[in-house]
Amino acid sequence: MPTVSLKRDLLFRALGRTYTDEEFDELCFEFGLELDEITSEKEIISKEQGNEKAQGASDVVLYKIDVPANRYDLLCLEGLVRGLQVFKERIKAPMYKRVMPNGEIQKLIITEETAKIRPYAVAAVLRNIKFTKDRYESFIELQEKLHQNICRKRALVAIGTHDLDTLSGPFTYTAKKPSDIKFKPLNKTKEYTACELMNIYKTDNHLKHYLHIIENKPLYPVIYDSNGVVLSMPPVINGHHSKITVNTRNIFIECTGTDFTKAKIVLDIIVTTFSEYCENQFTVEAAEVVFPNGKLHTFPELAYRKEMVRADLINKKVGIRETPENLAKLLTRMCLKSEVIGDGNQIEIEIPPTRADIIHACDIIEDAAIAYGYNNIQMTLPKTYTIANQFPLNKLTELLRHDMAAAGFTEALTFALCSQEDIADKLGLDISATKAVLISNPKTAEFQVARTTLLPGLLKTIAANRKMPLPLKLFEISDIVIKDSSRDVGARNYRHLCAVYYNKNPGFEIIHGLLDRLMQLLDVPPGEKKGGYVIKASEGPAFFPGRCAEIFARGQSIGKLGVLHPDVITKFELTMPCSCVEINIEPFL
Amino acid sequence: MADGPVAEVLLQRLEAADGGLDSAELAAELGVEHQTVVGAVKSLQALGEIIEAELRSTKRWELTAEGEEIAREGSHEARVFRSVPPEGLPQSELMRLPSGKVGFSKAMSNKWIRVDKSAADGPRVFRVVDSVEDEVQRRLQLVQGGQAEKLGEKERSELRKRKLLTEVNLKTYWVSKGSAFSTSISKQETELSPEMISSGSWRDRPFKPYNFSAHGVLPDSGHLHPLLKVRTQFRQIFLEMGFTEMPTDNYIESSFWNFDALFQPQQHPARDQHDTFFLRDPAQAQQLPMDYVHRVKRTHSQGGYGSQGYKYNWKLDEARKNLLRTHTTSASARALYRLAQKKPFTAAKYFSIDRVFRNETLDATHLAEFHQIEGVVADHGLTLGHLMGVLREFFSKLGITQLRFKPTYNPYTEPSMEVFSYHQGLKKWVEVGNSGIFRPEMLLPMGLPENVSVIAWGLSLEREHLLCTESCAVIMTYTSLLP
């Protein structure tokens, strides 16, 4: 969930009133925001770097507000205030208009070289805008928030904003060899080639995260104006030449990317949010984009879409009984201008370009419910009549858990993921013999594989509890994972039961006795005959020679028991003899 | 030995004594160590009300070993004086005497002797007075005779500085008759034995009282893991509410069931390598229900079922990627898909509690695996009010009655609501769960009828366990055996 940091006093000025912290928290809660933290720059620096560094930092109160991940229109002060003011019916949602320029329309021509790397571009112009320091900062901050969220760290979309008065169109969006691109990038004093820049930015804490997007491509995307001035090399850096400042009056905005839909949404969000500061409020000057196939598109789209939802559907889905007129009013408060039409039960809703999150009637229904107030909805119980069933495997597990504890063994809960070493090397096995599933991207060695046996987890639990008085008697009933090509995903779980006895003596007879008790509980008689169980001398790398037996029940092998090999004991950093049993309980279902 | 000889003597003396007797005095009289008498007192005390003993602490002056020597032989200075004959003694010879060094300077300052440095064969010592009073010896003898109080404070401290006297703290008992005083005592029995029961001898035997403030011996039993006990409680609640348990015994899931089926777009951040464990082997799911997959693909990329869709290029390869499930909602999706294949539709209530996995580095607040609790109701005409009603019942079974609901965003539910409960300990509203109505874009491609709604909620077992520990404090008293 993105967090937006706003100056409290600036926010209250824009809202036209002040709130206590509690009042504002309440308003946020109602609207689906979360006032996450009240802080200041000084407090943040002091928390992160110590009091000394915080000396002289601003102590202006900041509200950190969590915004739902699909509400890109609320990612800055302007958008958030507009949303809240409309919600509180203090203003009406503005109508955003795309206008044609008096002079020639700005043009962005896409060449076909971009196709393989970053094929889409959209553009627009904010004309006669008036920035202040705060507005300018908010404009920059919104781009950053969009980059981090909908733009997926610039991989899907990257935004460039430029001082139009320093440039001359038409613009060309093309892709070139890195060595052929040379320009003075933002906030640098000299020109570099793209190759040099990629090297320089490797150590830049901010920009290094975006290099991978184009790094290994033969061609890098780049935008030029008609004089060959570089506007930007998306998604990494803009040119210094067209840098915007607080005094900039006319802004050329381009968004390039690999996702056309999202590029259009991002452009719409930026222009709708900041057209408020244009001389002609809420108007945006159109720009033309020529695609490699020669097709001409005009942006921003600023599309208003009409949806029709029946009032009784809203009432039925939310569980309320409001008149169509009231529902229309509720929706209008969510920036969804609505009116009752047709037979009086039909509501026509206008989805503005700011609300790209509305893609289905259920999104409209949710907004009606929010405006109604979730906590005003009458709680009722559904009349759904059902008979409960336990999942048989879990039912068996629950029964056995209690019996194992009654038999004097203590239940452990261990991780299902572990290192390759735990299930293979330490037990004297080769990893290929375990049929374990392998994780491709673990952050640490503790999570290389899913366990194929419960034994390592229990041995590690003993190692972590060595200070406890002997004997240690532990068990776990849980799932292990084995590759199985007959399953849709190529792997399956097995429910295992494992118990260990750790003491000054191996205690094989105790583990054996536990198995006998288990079989008694499961109603499996001893003996070879059908339906019975026997143990037969066996061997395994984890066991002491001559102290291992395989367990057969109901005609199949279900596991092994025995005294652990001293090498295994040592590898798990243990010092005492230890015996164990591990079986698959699924045959007893 | 409660009835050792000393104890017997003690009781006899006590019977004859007027009021009581002092343990130290008795020890002196009997010529035994004081500690022996103390032992006898303690063992008699353990027998009940036979005697009463009051602990007294007295300070006493005792002679040090050197002090005792002086009391016997005289002070060093007196010994020096006595060894000087009338005709004098060479100083060097005097210094060789055992008391020479200390005694010489003291006798000099007492002006008992003098030194003639002009003598022919070196310095020679002569008596100055004819006879001396050995005050030091006299005083020490007084102390030895138990009359230390006759000495002044100053005199005593002077002797102490010379390390001849020392003050000892003596703990003695003032012993007097108890309410059940008797000179004849018998050994008390500690425990009832089978022989006593069969012979009836328990009737005549005294029994040693139990110490009820001691701790008992813990039973030699196994026990269940505290977190899994909470899991059992949650299972019980769901079963009481008529919910059927879903199979969740598949940690490995395809991206399709974990994300795509839930209408979670392929560029969603949760599908990043950063957040999710993907598999190297088996890397891909080989079998997917292709009919259904096509409907899912169309809904993502073009929309349908009343939806605009996400309008992006949906890739089958991305859906095939295997992973460790990030939520049990993947199992819910499979259960709902199975439900959708059953015709005609019958209402269902499902639940599950099982492990889920996130690609985190372990620390105090992050686990790479935890347990998710999930509840699902599928029926005709379910509303947001129904969801809230079910949540109210569910949480009230946990003892949580104050709830409120906050709008939120989840990729696969709409409307969505976070559930908050007022935490008495923290004095604030805390999030206890997440909930919502599954999106039609998720349900309709499965083949569920259009007027069927599915409400669902989820919470974390670990988090719930922490929030509940106020009321479930007993759970935490067991040793948690987590590695």
Image (cartoon, coloured by chain):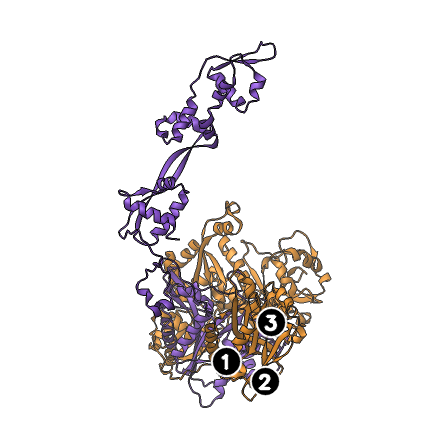
Chain colours: A orange, B purple
Judged by depth in the image, the label closer to the viewer, 2 or 1, is 2
Label 2: chain letter: A
Left or right of residue B390, residue A430 in this image = right
Tag 3 and tag 2 share a subunit: yes
Task: Give the quarter of the image for residue A114.
Answer: bottom right
Could you tell me if the residues under marks 2 and 1 are in contact, i.e. CB atoms within 8 Å? no
Q: Residues within 10 Å of mark 3 (few under 14, many from 20)?
A: many
The tally of labels here is: 3
Q: Which residue is mark 3?
A: A563
Looking at this view, is A522 or A99 the one in front?
A522
For the question of whether residue B401 can be seen, the reply is no
Could you tell me if the residues under marks 3 and 2 are in contact, i.e. CB atoms within 8 Å? no
Q: Which residue is mark 2?
A: A556
Could you tell me if the residues under marks 3 and 1 are in contact, i.e. CB atoms within 8 Å? no
Looking at this view, is A482 or B293 the one in front?
A482
Judged by depth in the image, the label closer to the viewer, 3 or 2, is 3
The residue lying at 30 percent from left, 62 percent from top is: B204
Label 1: chain letter: B
x and y, in percent, of residue B397 in the image: 36, 72
The residue lying at 45 percent from left, 62 percent from top is: A80
The amino acid type found where label 3 is placed reads: Val
The residue lying at 37 percent from left, 27 percent from top is: B153
Looking at this view, is A520 or B196 the one in front?
B196
